[in-house]
Image (cartoon, rainbow, N blue to C red):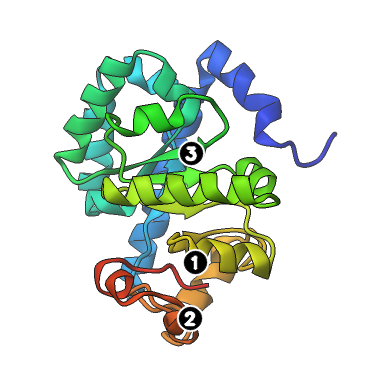
Amino acid sequence: TEGLMPPDRFIPLFEKNGFIIRLDEYIWEQACITLRRWIDHGLTPTPISVNMSRMHIHDPRLREKLLDLMRRYELPPHLLELELTESAFLENESGLFESMKALQAFGFQFSMDDFGSGYSSLNMLKSMPVDFIKIDRGFLNEVVTTERGKTVIRFSISLAREMSIKVIAEGVETEEQRDFLMRAGCLYAQGYYFYRPMPPEEFEPIIANPANVDYRGLQADRIEQLQLRQLLSDSVLSD
């Protein structure tokens, strides 16, 4: 056996043979089970981001499947964030946008993963109906080493915010990266600087302690680094 296998080893195969549909739907249900458990245990649930393969664009029952999950587990749709990779937006754009808007009307939220890994991201921002974009970790690591790169990141964040799209930086591993992103107006981040991946049983005690998570989004010792208008209009995901 090979042990743990990274997604890029098996996802292309699953997309080719169609098994990715079943895998995604299994993960969606497991996320709903977890969210339901948190609510039943008196925890304030945090939204869970789940992958949605571009293969789902062609599924006429997509809306029905997602709404059925919400009904069965008695969940508000905004708790299940649907994540598409940047490459998905390059295929069947009109059909994808139509499906996304229909689901957003029911309260689902969409994020665009791997932003910056392709070449059409900024052009697509003007028309794609996403609630979040996630800056690709490779893009972040590559550009923050130069002043020109930092300008590109600041411009991308500013442009997204002007369109009321929230920005999440992926792969933040250093204090330098965190500080730069906060100065640039990026108020959400994930990466090893904050926490490494962990199973639900380790995560649940963290969100159960009110001292660890501020559900307004602000972490007290970071407030001084934010501008007042950001404090009033946005939330920061605490680490």
Which residue shows up at 38% across the image and 63% down it? 46
Q: Find numbered disc 3 in the image and state the secondary structure of the residue it sits on.
A: strand
In this rendering, the answer to whether 129 lies above or below 20 is: below
Q: Which residue is mark 3?
A: 113
Which residue shows up at 48% across the image and 60% down it? 184
The Cα–Cα distance between marks 3 and 1, rounded to whole angstroms, is 20 Å
Q: Which mark is residue 222?
A: 2
In this rendering, the answer to whether 225 lies above or below 66 is: below
Question: Residues at badges 2 and 1 in contact (C-beta under 8 Å)?
Answer: yes
Amino acid bearing label 3: Asp
Q: Which residue is mark 1?
A: 182
Quarter of image, res 202: bottom right
Q: Find numbered disc 2 in the image and state the secondary structure of the residue it sits on.
A: helix
> As drawn, which residue projects farthest toward the front?
147
Circle 3 residues within 10 Å: few <14, some 14–19, many ≥20: many
Amino acid bearing label 1: Met
Quarter of image, res 5: top right
